[in-house]
Image (cartoon, rainbow, N blue to C red):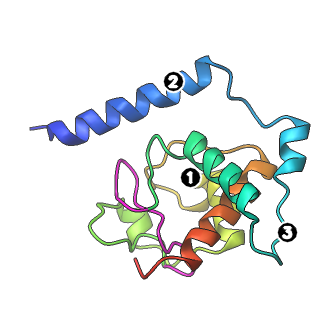
Amino acid sequence: MINPILLRSWLIGALSGAAFCIVGYGNLSANDASALRVNEELPLSAAALDEAKALYQRRCGACHSIETNRIGPKHQGVFGREAGSALDYNYSDALAQSDLIWNEQTLDQWLANPEATIPGQKMGYRLSSAEERKVIIAYLRSQSETSVAP
């Protein structure tokens, strides 16, 4: 039997993702990308953090949340966490058995091509824009630094 709450979450996420595609949320324009440039040495400014959060919500929010598990696992405290270890989430065997630790490099590889990073995982989304990946990774880092353990 299908869990109606999970089905509803999946449908909302799928429709949200489709809506973003229909209204033209493609890659960031050159102006948007330069405005969001991230310097890994410095924390995000308040304005850059707001923009990064909006990008995270557009690209990841259909399936993920910082605070709660949804279709995908929560991202709170993701930096330094072992892949497949967020509490109360049903990971694929491939991800749960991996020994990957999330950091800038592993998140960039994962977001660019999850299946190439960990064959057999269940995430079916790729983020082709290196600039968007960089901004989202900086946002995830900021949320890991301000949050408590997973």
Mark 1 = which residue? Answer: 115
Task: Give the mark toward the camera: 2 or 1.
Answer: 2
- The residue located at (49%, 75%) in the rendering is 77
64 relative to 135 in the view: left or right: left
- The residue located at (41%, 69%) in the rendering is 84
- The residue located at (48%, 48%) in the rendering is 123
Element type where label 3 sits in the image: loop
**Which residues, given as a range, are shown in magenta?**
67-81
Is there CB contact under 8 Å for labels 1 and 3? no
Q: Nearer the viewer, residue 139 or 21?
A: 139
Q: Is residue 14 above or below residue 42?
A: above
Mark 3 = which residue? Answer: 39
Q: Quick one: label 2 or label 3, which is nearer the N terminus?
A: 2
What is the magenta segment's predominant secondary structure? loop
Q: Position of residue 83 (x, y in %)?
A: 48, 72
User: In the current view of this chain or complex, which residue is farthest to the top?
Assistant: 22
Q: Position of residue 126 (x, y in %)?
A: 62, 44
Q: Is residue 30 above or below residue 89?
A: above
Q: Which kind of residue does numbered mark 1 sit on?
A: Glu
Residue 18's mark? 2
Tell me the quarter of the image containing the N terminus: top left
Q: Quick one: label 1 or label 3, which is nearer the N terminus?
A: 3
Element type where label 2 sits in the image: helix
Q: Is residue 14 above or below residue 39?
A: above
Dividing the picture into quadrants, the one containing residue 121 is bottom left
Quick one: label 3, few (<14), some, or many (20+) residues within 10 Å? few
Question: How far is mark 2 from mark 3, CA to CA?
Answer: 32 Å
Task: Give the mark toward the camera: 2 or 3.
Answer: 3
- The residue located at (65%, 69%) in the rendering is 106
Q: Which kind of residue does numbered mark 3 sit on?
A: Asn
Q: Position of residue 22 (x, y in %)?
A: 60, 17
